Image (cartoon, coloured by chain):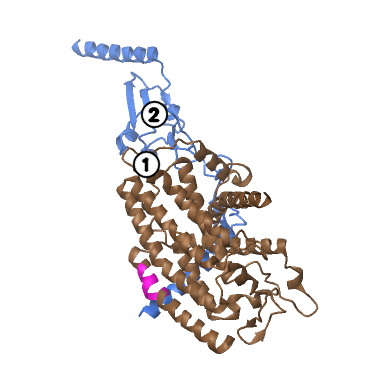
Chain colours: A brown, B blue
Amino acid sequence: MTELLLHIIVPVAIFGFIAVFTLFAVYAERKIAGFVQDRLGPMETGKYGLLQTIADILKLLQKELITPKAADSILFAAAPIVIFGAVFLGFSVIPWAPDFLPANTNTGLFFIMAIVSIDAIGILMAGWGSNNKYSLLGAIRAIAQMISYEIPVGLSLIAAVMITQTLNLNDIAFNQGILTNEPIYFLGLWDVSQVGGFLAWNIFQAPHLIVVYVIFFIASLAECNRAPFDIPEAESELIGGFHTEYGGIRFAFIFLAEYAMMFLVAMLGVVIFLGGWNTPLPNIGSLRLAEWTTGLFWGIFWTLSKSLFIVGVQMWIRWTLPRFRADQLMTLCWKIMIPLAFICMGISAIWRILVMI
Amino acid sequence: MIFKTTIQGFTTAVKGLLLTVKHLFGARKSREELDIRRENYFDKQDGVVTVQFPKDRMPIPEVARYQLDVEIDDCIVCDLCAKACPVDCITIESVKSPEAIGKTSDGSVKRLYAAQFDIDMAKCMYCGLCTVVCPTECITMTNQYDRSTTKLTDLIYDFAVMSDEEIAQRKAEWTRFQADKEAAKIK
């Protein structure tokens, strides 16, 4: 019985988190956009516009569900559920704190890669089901981009997995801090198993993983269709993209999925490269900072703060860099990031054989 | 080639990111001086530029380039402004007077009554040519710009002060004067 309850509570809690995160991420996005452009952002609804996104979601919830006459009504209605479901399921294997994760599976990373790819099908369903040429074009562009960028994401994750030797995200996080079962070497030289902190993170265990993380980060931006890779949506140039025909709560779900995806890829990058729930503070002599700041609540705190920081960087990049042209997008993917990811994969293999033994 | 463009792209991206983050944290303060007439105006322009309009307003000169105003007592109804107007938004109708009506504040003699003096602010393009040609400087631009209305005709400003009876009376006076003159000529 308690197990059944747990199976209900956990998804509801994660959904609640995603909803609250989305509300405040949209607000943060608009505020950051404003500040970067020397504006103020939303100011009218509530103190400093704090209630703006709540007003927005209330508006969306009240709206009528409109299905275009020529649309494929089943695909049209199912697409937002598929899109959101794919991203939502991705959260099921990501650890928040030591041994604190919805499902501790040995194939966690593989599961995420597989389930997030379903997102692409949902987008195609939305574009095709709308029966609108602009929606379909937007969907096709989104799919082309997402499938291309799945390759650098996959390769960069393989490069990291070669170092970690496990697909279990819980174990990957464990092996980056003081709770590790295996010896950890900072840059392959200095045993930091008892020191922990940022020195034990994967990007510092093998320095080429910094490059890998940059590749992963850029490719994950494209995966979640965010600027500077947002040609499928390009709200300043095109009409909506694949969600042109959507309104009301269906649009809200697509939007929710977009922001959930942002947080998911940020969290995945944090778990695999930036130490997951491990504290960035190392033990220094008798100052046992790492031990003091490790635990269930500290774990959740570090996961959240690191992921939110990465989400902040995503927003920062969005409001800085101009949009890529479609051919530049493909050039970046196929000619730069994939070869670089392959080289890093080779370095990972050599590192594993020669340094970590 | 590809290495060069990649590295260049990366460095320029970092440069841009540093610039925007500077603005992000620079947004903690807003610009201090809103009045362009102040001497050190351009030194105090860092930070947020937004002026939250209905609550704060930018100080502007009394004769800024906004809506027109006519001091009808100073108007000699010369029609120059209506002729100068590129969009023909000024409509003037005059009634002649047998003798001088009076003097404007700068001493010009008024010989015409302004039966109609309408300016259609919806048509006006705020070029200010009418204010340049006005010999008595009775038509000026003001600092009033915040005028919105649901009826387009509300934007036609009527500056004439004469009532219909007065106009009819003045017209009658002029026709009588003309008739008298004709009669005098015939004699």
Q: Position of residue B108 (x, y in %)?
A: 40, 31
Q: Which of marks 2 and 1 is in front?
A: 1
Q: In this view, does A204 lie to the left or right of A282?
A: left
Q: Which of B65 and B107 is in front in this view?
A: B65
Q: Nearer the viewer, residue A143 or A92?
A: A92
Q: Where is residue A291 in the image (x, y as percent from the top left)?
A: 75, 72
Q: Where is residue A131 in the image (x, y as percent from the top left)?
A: 32, 45
Secondary structure beneath dot 1 equals helix
Magenta region? A330-337
Q: Can residue A225 be seen in this view?
A: no
Residue assigned mark 2? B152
- The quadrant holding residue A91 is bottom right
Whether callout 2 and callout 1 share a subunit is answered no
Residue assigned mark 1? A73
What residue is at 58 percent from the left and 68 percent from the top?
A: A169
The disc labelled 2 sits on which kind of residue?
Leu
Number of dots carrying numbers: 2
Q: Which of A100 and A131 is in front in this view?
A: A100
What residue is at 33 percent from the left and 20 percent from the top?
A: B95
Q: Is the magenta stretch mostly helix, strand or loop?
A: helix
The disc labelled 1 sits on which kind of residue?
Ser
Above or below A298: residue B86: above
Secondary structure beneath dot 2 equals helix
Q: Position of residue A125 (x, y in %)?
A: 38, 51
What residue is at 46 percent from the left and 45 percent from the top?
A: A251
